[in-house]
Each structure stands twice: as structure tokens, then as C-alpha cells.
Amino acid sequence: MAFIQCTLAALVLHVACGSYLAHRAAAYHGGVGAYHHGGYQGYEAAPSYDYAAYPAYSSASSYQADYPSYSKPVDYYSPPKYSFNYGVKDYHTGDVKDQWEERDGDVVKGEYSLVEPDGTTRKVTYTADDHNGFNAVVHKSGTAHHPTTVAHAPVYHHAYRR
């Protein structure tokens, strides 16, 4: 604890003395007198004191950024419009599906279809707008094929004799 107190006292002393040490001490420039034999010697020049110059005050320069000018303004409130479609047909893995969708303003229309694991095809046609909300019509086509499991008869082994 004493070490911490001594360290803090030394730090405070260093900071307090730092303001005195930041400026140069006054320099004494006195003329050097010369001794002559006989006659009038005169007076030496008065001593002059030289102090360190303080930094001059300068206000911050005013900076004005140049804003870029654009030739064509961007209209952020234009109605959205897009259209896309995609499809996958991988019969090896059974991944068969496709979809399309288009949007014009606040009206969205689309359709997607996929092959279910039981072999049937599900086709969904949908629309969405502000007046009617989201509406979907689902059609299922094809017949479901459920694989039958085959139960094997148990195999009996002869017991070992000792």
C-alpha cells in the first residue's frame, strides 16, 4: 500500500513540475566587462532577459466538403417490379421441382410444383395483393406409391453340441 501511495505522490509531483519544465528558464545575457589600465572604463551593458516564446494561437481552418453531384436522381419510391423462374430435375435423388413468380407493384403472382416422396406431384398457384391478401390453390395429381415392406422368415440354426 505504501508503494502505491509513493508512486501516486511521485506521479502528482511529476505532473505538477511538468508545467514548469515545459518552458525554458530565463537566460541571462550580460556583457563581459574588460579591464583596462587607467582611463575611463565606462559601464557595462545592462543585462537582458530572454524568455521562451509561447505558441501563437491559430483558429481551426474552416473546411467545407464538396458534395458529389449526380446526373440522374434515384427514385426510391418507384413501384417494385421483378420476375424469376427456376427448376431442378434430378431424377437420381428424386429432387424434381420448379417455380416462377412475378411482381408488379403490390401484386404478386406465382406457381411452384414439386414431386412428393410418395410419387405424387403437388402444384401450388398463389396470388397476393393489398385487397385480397395471400391466396393459394393447391392441386395434387398422380397416385401415391407406398413401398411395401417385406418381412423375411426367421432363419433357425442348429444348436451346437458339446
Image: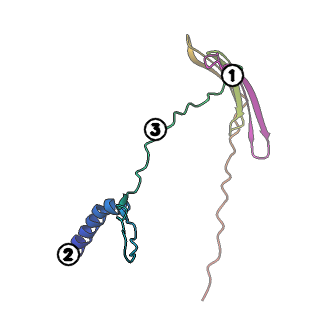
Mark toward the viewer: 2 or 1: 2
Q: Helix, strand or loop at disc 3?
A: loop
Distance from label 1 to label 3 (Cα)? Answer: 65 Å
Q: Earlier in the sequence, mark 1 or mark 3?
A: 3
- Badge 2 density bin: few <14, some 14–19, many ≥20, Cα 10 Å: few
At x 79%, y 42%, the residue is 91
Q: Which residues are magenta?
A: 73-102
Distance from label 2 to label 3 (Cα)? Answer: 46 Å
Q: Amino acid at mark 3?
A: Ser
At x 56%, y 13%, the residue is 130
Q: Is residue 34 left or right of residue 77?
A: left
Q: Amino acid at mark 2?
A: Ala
Mark toward the viewer: 2 or 3: 3
Q: Earlier in the sequence, mark 2 or mark 3?
A: 2
- Residue 84 lies in quadrant: top right
Q: Helix, strand or loop at disc 1?
A: strand
Residue 61 position (above or below residue 85): below
Q: Amino acid at mark 1?
A: Gly
Q: Is residue 66 left or right of residue 145?
A: left
Of the pair 57 and 104, the residue shown nearer to us: 57
Of the pair 130 and 35, the residue shown nearer to us: 35
Image location (x, y in percent) of residue 151: 65, 55
Identify the residue under disc 2.
2
